[in-house]
Image (spheres, rainbow, N blue to C red):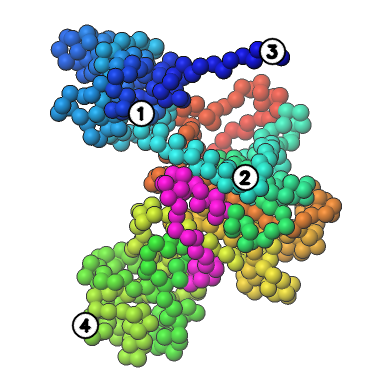
């Protein structure tokens, strides 16, 4: 090899990044650029004519807007794609726009080249007005030009990048897993894909890479991660889409502590990437404590209004409504005056909709006297003990629910959110680990326990014996080695230490009512793999859509997804889902049944 090719001189000396048709990005021009001849390219955001001889063009690209002054009439309309070459200069005095990054400068002596013409957009792209979401999604390519979407998708890209760097720093390797698979065990409805080569058989789209990441551990990959697409055919809501992205992770020879550490580092990096500063230290709470204090397994710990135990206070009560296995209350400081009869009736109706038999309210008056329609049914000692337990003072509103314990948690937990929850990202980003989840969340109609996580979750070390001898309701006391990550009251993700021993796995399957044949048919390949030396392993997955939404202050995850579906699962952009060609159906061996006739 002689004469190595000399390095190409950068054509664009100033920014070092701009290439192609431009020298600079619109939003990056500053006073320091005054005097330079630049080319910028983008969309005409706004055009103002000053007489016949002067036009002001606001040119927009991904980085923002710059004002370009064009001599002579420019036949330009909104959203035309143009390249403008001119000289950067100070804006004349009195015309500086402090609200704009480029507000001190403008590009003058411009020549304009039209690269593409544009029809008038069906909605304004300036973020100043709320636009119907269907319209936005139908023309998502236009919607994406708006500041809000640009900002959100850029933040998303930063989050992905920070997460990758953080987990790779900890030794994780990215492994891709297939999209066409057999069903996975996350418990939602699968999307299924017919097989042309095996008519009558179907693939499922992965609800998560769960089984493959566990197999990767048997395969000796040691630390796996993937920013994985997961698909679940569930009803859509503000925080749920058919397809969503999660950081999926699994590691061998580690337990809960290490996994919590891996994930903490990743989310801290993600927050710092978007906000510029790391979040406060991540706290930890057991599932039971979360339920007892906040009435939720995803407690929003940014505010108080905690649930206070009152069962003992009313242990010997004469008041029928409080003769229940559990009585708890919350104190809303200083709220007595704000809650008139109508509001209290509404709150009671609300509590009943959530499943309570009723809601007892009391207002604290001077001297700790309780004003309430039910005060007369409580003894003086009970009233005094109640005031002490709730630490109540004059002007407070007390709300009390008595019922089965889980019902009390549920109702007071929701009431607490209703009364005190701050906006999604107010007060920064408060993460919380919730650990020691129960292994089972309920019993089904046949009395089989229903897993709270997926069936590969290891029981808690201290509860193995309990699991072996448990009967009926006792199952609900068995804890697992499953943990969740919560952010500002949103469940961000979950994971667990896995069962790596075939004998314990068999035991859990049989408890879940999954017989050996069903287990073999559904997860046979995993059980087979475990026969060949499975390392102890544990993992986690958290939703990236939710995380990004919270970081940029959006309530709805559709705002942080480039091409989301509507609430009804439709994609107004492409028209999906659509019928397919009859020939395609024939090839797949499928026939569409007529829709069932509604009963007359
Ligand atoms: N596969 C689980 C999920 O997607 C997370 C995990 O256990 O790693 O929810």
Is ligand 1 within 8 Å of the beta carbon of the residue shown at mark 1? no
Q: Give the range drawn in magenta.
A: 263-292
Identify the secondary structure beneath mark 2: helix
Q: Distance between the residues labelled 2 and 3?
A: 39 Å
Would residue 251 be found to the left or right of residue 241 on screen? right
Comparing labels 1 and 4, the label whose residue is closer to the camera: 1
Q: Few, some or many C-alpha atoms within 10 Å of disc 1 (few <14, some 14-19, many ≥20)?
A: some
**Residue matched to label 3:** 2
Q: Can residue 138 be seen in this view?
A: no
Residue 151 at what x, y percent from top left? 40, 36
Labels 2, 4: front one: 2
**Residue, disc 4:** 366
Within 10 Å of disc 2 (Cα), the crowding (few <14, some 14-19, many 20+) is some
- Compared to residue 133, the image places residue 396 above or below, namely below
Confirm or deny contact between disc 2 and disc 3 (CB under 8 A).
no
In the image: residue 487, left or right of residue 231: left
Residue 27 at what x, y percent from top left? Answer: 34, 28
Q: Earlier in the sequence, mark 2 or mark 3?
A: 3
Compare marks 2 and 4 and give the one earlier in the sequence: 2
Label 1 vs 4, first from the N-terminus: 1
Q: Residue 168 carries which label?
A: 2
Position of residue 369 measured from the top left corner of the image (x, y, whole percent): 25, 84
Q: Name the residue under label 1.
A: 28
**Which comes sooner in the sequence, label 3 or label 1?**
3
481 with respect to 321 (left or right):
right
* Picture residue at 57% right of the left edge, 53% below the top: 263
Closer to the camera: disc 4 or disc 3? 3
Real-space CA distance between mark 2 and mark 4, rounded to the nearest whole angstrom: 61 Å
365 left or right, relative to 533: left
The answer to which of 223 and 212 lies nearer the viewer is 223
């Amino acid at each position: 090899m002689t004469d190595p090719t000399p390095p190409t001189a950068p054509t664009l000396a100033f920014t070092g990044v701009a290439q192609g048709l431009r020298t600079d990005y619109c939003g990056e021009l500053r006073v320091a650029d005054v005097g330079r001849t630049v080319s910028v390219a983008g969309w005409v955001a706004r055009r103002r004519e000053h007489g016949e001889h002067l036009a002001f063009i606001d040119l927009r690209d991904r980085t923002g807007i710059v004002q370009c002054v064009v001599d002579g009439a420019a036949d330009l309309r909104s959203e035309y794609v143009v390249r403008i070459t001119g000289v950067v200069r100070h804006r004349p005095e009195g015309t500086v726009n402090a609200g704009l990054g480029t507000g001190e400068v403008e590009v003058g002596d411009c020549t304009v080249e039209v690269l593409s013409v544009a029809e008038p957009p069906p909605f304004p792209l300036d973020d100043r007005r709320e636009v119907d979401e269907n319209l936005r999604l139908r023309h998502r390519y236009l919607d994406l030009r708006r500041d809000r979407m640009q900002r959100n998708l850029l933040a998303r890209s930063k989050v992905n990048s920070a997460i990758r760097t953080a987990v790779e720093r900890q030794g994780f390797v990215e492994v891709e897993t297939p999209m066409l698979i057999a069903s996975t065990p996350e418990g939602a409805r699968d999307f299924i894909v017919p097989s042309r080569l095996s008519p009558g058989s179907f693939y499922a789209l992965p609800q998560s890479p769960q089984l493959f990441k566990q197999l990767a551990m048997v395969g000796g990959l040691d630390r796996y991660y993937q920013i994985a697409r997961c698909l679940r055919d569930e009803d859509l809501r503000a925080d749920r889409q058919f397809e969503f992205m999660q950081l999926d992770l699994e590691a061998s020879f580690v337990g809960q502590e290490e996994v919590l550490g891996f994930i903490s580092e990743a989310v801290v990096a993600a927050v710092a990437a978007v906000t510029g500063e790391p979040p406060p230290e991540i706290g930890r709470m057991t599932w039971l404590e979360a339920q007892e204090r906040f009435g939720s397994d995803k407690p929003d710990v940014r505010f108080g209004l905690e649930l206070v135990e009152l069962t003992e206070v009313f242990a010997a009560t004469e008041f029928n409504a409080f003769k229940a296995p559990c009585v708890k209350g919350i104190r809303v400081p200083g709220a007595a005056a704000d809650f008139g009869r109508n509001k209290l009736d509404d709150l009671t109706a609300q509590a009943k909709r959530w499943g309570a038999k009723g809601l007892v309210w009391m207002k604290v008056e001077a001297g700790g006297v309780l004003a309430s329609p039910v005060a007369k049914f409580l003894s003086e000692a009970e009233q005094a003990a109640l005031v002490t337990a709730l630490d109540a003072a004059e002007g407070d509103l007390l709300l009390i629910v008595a019922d089965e314990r889980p019902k009390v948690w549920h109702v007071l937990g929701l009431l607490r959110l209703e009364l005190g929850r701050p906006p999604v990202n107010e007060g920064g980003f408060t993460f919380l680990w919730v650990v020691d989840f129960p292994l089972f969340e309920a019993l089904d109609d046949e009395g089989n326990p229903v897993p709270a996580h997926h069936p590969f979750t290891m029981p808690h070390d201290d509860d193995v014996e309990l699991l072996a001898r448990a009967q009926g309701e006792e199952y609900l006391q068995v804890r697992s080695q499953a943990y969740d990550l919560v952010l500002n009251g949103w469940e961000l993700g979950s994971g667990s230490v896995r069962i790596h021993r075939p004998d314990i796995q068999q035991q859990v399957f049989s408890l879940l009512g999954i017989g050996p044949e069903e287990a073999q048919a559904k997860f046979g390949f995993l059980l087979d793999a475990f026969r060949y030396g499975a390392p102890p392993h544990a993992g986690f997955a958290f939703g990236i859509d939710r995380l990004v939404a919270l970081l940029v202050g959006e309530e709805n995850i559709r705002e942080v997804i480039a091409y989301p579906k509507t609430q009804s699962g439709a994609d107004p952009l492409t028209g999906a889902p659509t019928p397919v060609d009859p020939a395609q159906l024939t090839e797949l061996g499928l026939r569409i049944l007529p829709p069932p006739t509604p009963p007359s």
